[in-house]
């Protein structure tokens, strides 16, 4: 059996075999899982109720986490963004955001995780889409992003009084909205979700997790039949095929004529509301006519539209509209009886848009390499 890079990649069966092969009793499996998923240990040496010889054997065989931190940046709104290196040298980004609901105990910590290194969908406005696709993440690599921030929050709160509206200091929501198309990595994504949800794992409610998709129709239909009540967000960004073909190229394969019926079917089968994400780009998809077209498209669905002005630090061709235009678009949707929320982009000042930190890192690495080649020549 090839040992995975990280602990969380192991199935229960694999973990049981390793424990047995090291001459330890079966209950060690539960002890190990508790240390990793509930106490957020980052090394085997922390697991002080396990025999030292056993910990050393584990340490020699694998790492607790498959991720190494390359860069961390914190935005003025508290958003923390981390660039991780995977065991094979690929890089991914994740972010921790917090939201205050206004009352006591209403602070929520949301982790935005990546599911692929790069992305094959190639949305023109997205830094990740422009970097191309490297590979799917394993379920362990997905889980480790959540555990990293769980541990981060625990360390951050040590010795500090929590804000009044923060009862838990724990990760309260996970959104699969980072790099990659989650539904293109369905099996690994689902394995990660089951472990994050499981009582033996991270114990996070399924309803506190949201999968974001660019619109993979067969996988939306598959998701509708899953038992766990995970949320679904569809990145729409345009309400006609001509424009959506340009902004979200997967639309050429699964046009709106297939996507919207699949969403209606999801509504019917699950009884759950879904979200439509609509990033507003200045002069591209922000007119009143386009708002009406959007309302018409999703009329009668159990859904919610999240309007998100584009990130001003991203591609200069895809800038946010002025605020008045954003408000007019929102008003028009409301007038058409569509549930809508205007969301502010988090971490604007730290390039928290999908793939931007990684893109900068790749550019920096390239220029360092070029400089060292030049230096070698002189
Ligand atoms: S927006 Fe999402 S689906 Fe589109 S290229 Fe970026 S990561 Fe991929």
Image (cartoon, rainbow, N blue to C red):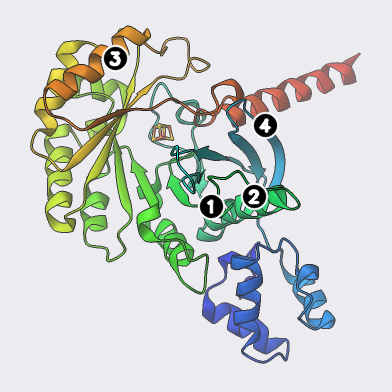
Residue nearest the observer in this picture, 327 or 199: 327
> x%, y% of residue 256?
16, 33
* 3D distance between C-alphas at marks 3 and 2: 35 Å
Query: Which label is found at residue 171?
Result: 1
Image quadrant in which you'd find residue 64: bottom right
> x%, y% of residue 169?
59, 52
Assign a secondary structure to mark 4.
strand
Residue occupying image coordinates x 81% and y 18% = 371
> x%, y% of residue 319?
42, 12
Residue nearest the observer in this picture, 102 or 86: 102
Q: Which callout, 4 or 2, points at the residue further toward the start of the chain?
A: 4
Image quadrant in which you'd find residue 170: bottom right
Assign a secondary structure to mark 2.
helix
Local crowd size for mark 1, using a 10 Å CA cut-off: few (<14), some (14–19), many (≥20): many
> x%, y% of residue 192?
47, 61
* 3D distance between C-alphas at marks 4 and 3: 31 Å
Q: Which callout, 4 or 3, points at the residue further toward the start of the chain?
A: 4
- In this rendering, which labeled residue sits more in front, label 4 or label 2? 2
Residues tagged 4 and 1 counted as in contact (Cβ below 8 A): no
Residues tagged 4 and 3 counted as in contact (Cβ below 8 A): no
Residue occupying image coordinates x 13% and y 21% = 335
Which residue lies under the disc numbered 2? 153
- In this rendering, which labeled residue sits more in front, label 4 or label 3? 3
Residue 205 appears in view:
yes
- Give the vertical position of 248 relative to 112 (above or below): above
Which residue lies under the disc numbered 3? 327
* 3D distance between C-alphas at marks 4 and 1: 19 Å
Query: Which label is found at residue 73?
Result: 4
Q: In the picture provided, is 272 more to the left or to the right than 100?
A: left
Residues tagged 4 and 2 counted as in contact (Cβ below 8 A): no
Mark 1 residue's CB less than 8 Å from ligand 1? no
């Amino acid at each position: 059996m090839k040992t995975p890079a990280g602990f969380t990649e192991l199935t229960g069966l694999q973990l049981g075999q390793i424990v047995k092969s090291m001459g330890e009793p079966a209950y060690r499996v539960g002890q190990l899982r508790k240390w990793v998923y509930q106490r957020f240990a980052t090394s085997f040496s922390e697991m002080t109720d396990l025999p030292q010889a056993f910990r050393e054997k584990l340490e020699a065989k694998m790492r607790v986490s498959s991720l190494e931190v390359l860069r961390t940046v914190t935005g003025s709104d508290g958003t923390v963004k981390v660039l991780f290196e995977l065991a094979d040298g690929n890089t991914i980004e994740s972010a921790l955001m917090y939201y205050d609901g206004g009352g006591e105990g209403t602070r929520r910590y949301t982790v935005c995780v990546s599911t692929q290194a790069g992305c094959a969908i190639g949305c023109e406005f997205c830094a990740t889409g422009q970097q191309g696709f490297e590979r799917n993440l394993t379920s362990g690599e997905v889980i480790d992003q959540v555990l990293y921030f769980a541990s981060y929050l625990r360390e951050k709160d040590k010795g500090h009084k929590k804000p009044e509206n923060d009862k838990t200091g724990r990760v309260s929501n996970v959104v699969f909205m980072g790099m990659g198309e989650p539904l293109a990595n369905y099996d690994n994504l689902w394995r990660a979700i089951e472990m994050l949800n499981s009582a033996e794992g991270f114990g996070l409610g399924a309803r506190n997790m949201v999968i974001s998709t660019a619109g993979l129709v067969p996988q939306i239909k598959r998701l509708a039949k899953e038992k766990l009540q995970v949320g679904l967000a569809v990145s729409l960004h345009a309400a006609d095929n001509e424009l959506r073909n340009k902004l979200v190229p997967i639309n050429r394969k699964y046009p709106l004529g297939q996507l919207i019926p699949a969403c209606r079917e999801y509504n019917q089968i699950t009884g759950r509301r879904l979200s439509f994400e609509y990033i507003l780009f200045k002069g591209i998809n922000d007119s009143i006519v386009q708002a009406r077209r959007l309302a018409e498209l999703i009329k009668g669905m159990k859904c919610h539209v999240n309007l998100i002005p584009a990130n001003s630090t991203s591609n200069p061709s895809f800038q946010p509209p002025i605020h008045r235009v954003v408000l007019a678009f929102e008003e028009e949707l409301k007038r058409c009886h569509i549930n809508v929320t205007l969301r502010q982009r988090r971490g604007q000042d730290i390039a928290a848009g999908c793939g931007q930190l990684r893109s900068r890192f790749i550019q920096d690495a390239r220029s360092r390499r070029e400089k060292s080649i030049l230096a070698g020549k002189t």
